[in-house]
Image (spheres, rainbow, N blue to C red):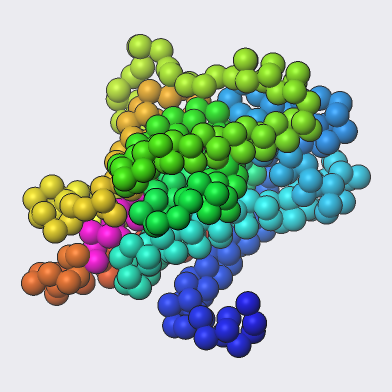
Amino acid sequence: MSFSALRLRIGAPQLVALLLLLIFLAQCFWFSARIPLSAMEGTYIEAGLLHLERLANAASPARSPLVPLMAGVAARVSGAEHNILNLNSYRLLIRLPFLLVGALLGASLWYVARRLYGNIGGYVALGLYCFSPVTVAWSSQVGPEIVGAWGAFGLIFTAIAVAHTLYAPREVVLWNWKRILLMGLSIAICIGAQYSLWILLIPALAFMLWVGHVRPGAALIIFLAACAVGMFLLCGFYSFRPSVFRAALASADWLEIAANDISIRAVSSLFAAFFLQNGIGLVLLLAVCLVAFLVWKKTRFFGTAAPLFTGLLLVALAFRMHFAVFAFLVVSLPFLMLFMAGVSVDLLESRHAVVANAVVVGVLIANATVDVYSLMHLTLRNR
């Protein structure tokens, strides 16, 4: 694409999105510069460096070596590998791959929201994301949560995008080879970050068959081809050593279900703490959108139902997870934010637009206020 053609495609929506993402990255850099590396981050870095040297396998029963490799490569490129006792001096560079993944997830959320709901939907979704203390914090640390969230979001919406092409009068399987590769990459990132996220393959296939019901055979072939690509890329995280890869798959914990004596009170407290970290405004907007979805037919269409179903599935599964609770909750956030953006657009276009504007704008302002306060509080606490 020529520069002049690119310039014509960049308008006010793209510039607003870029500004919001730059503000998001600024918050992430602020967080990273002031919060030292945690013990868990140090474990990922060490495991990644040992994996690069083939001295140890960085995989665990819960995940592939993807996240340790990202941290290990960043430590090697930054020079931290030669100053292992002073890793905190390199924490910005070590965390940089995860900051970029967080920004890419935000860009993906904006792109999908804008395609589904228009410019206003894109602004609402990206505003919720960029001023979320949860997304800022998890994008600013070494860990599988934000990586899995990006892979999961790409998996679901690439599957839906592929399904929409099945109506075209052409050889859709071969014509979709780029989307097959993209979907395979999403599968590898999603499952590579957390094995138990394989569960999202089920709604991805269901959405493909629902949207692309005119060619179910082609949808199934594309899905299986993407899975094959994903498995190939997963094997790459193990340096393409089939025996090691097979052993890892055999010992993987594919569904981290907790014991039956799980405390409902403890889980409820954890969930409340997680969602309230974003401020009461986000919880309020989610409640308003859920009520509107249930009572107002206009808000109920595939573009809002798909992210809501996926988000609620992840939240429900998090109730039964053992160690992957936070991973599933973080992965659910972009889907719930997308749902809220879609319903908000319908509310803003209704005869209750004045009230809806007050609620949506108020939530966005409150969200930003809570976010800035959280960052300042963390800074003061870690001086």
| Outermost residue, right side | 82
Image quarter in which the C terminus is found: bottom right
Q: Residue at x 44, y 64 (%)?
A: 111
Work out whether 345 lies above or below 82.
below
Residue 150 visible, this angle: no
Work out whether 5 lies above or below 91.
below
Residue 340 place in picture, x, y as percent: 28, 56
Q: Residue at x 30, y 25 (%)?
A: 265
| Magenta segment boundaries in residue numbering | 335-345
Secondary structure mainly formed by the magenta segment: helix
Query: Camera-side residue: 252 or 77?
Result: 252
Query: Camera-side residue: 348 or 172?
Result: 172
Image quarter in which the N terminus is found: bottom right
Q: Residue at x 10, y 55 (%)?
A: 296
Residue 118 place in picture, x, y as percent: 32, 70
Residue 61 visible, this angle: yes
Residue 37 place in picture, x, y as percent: 68, 44
Tell whether 57 sits left or right of 320.
Answer: right
Work out whether 272 lies above or below 126.
above
Magenta segment includes 179: no
Q: Residue at x 49, y 30 (%)?
A: 198
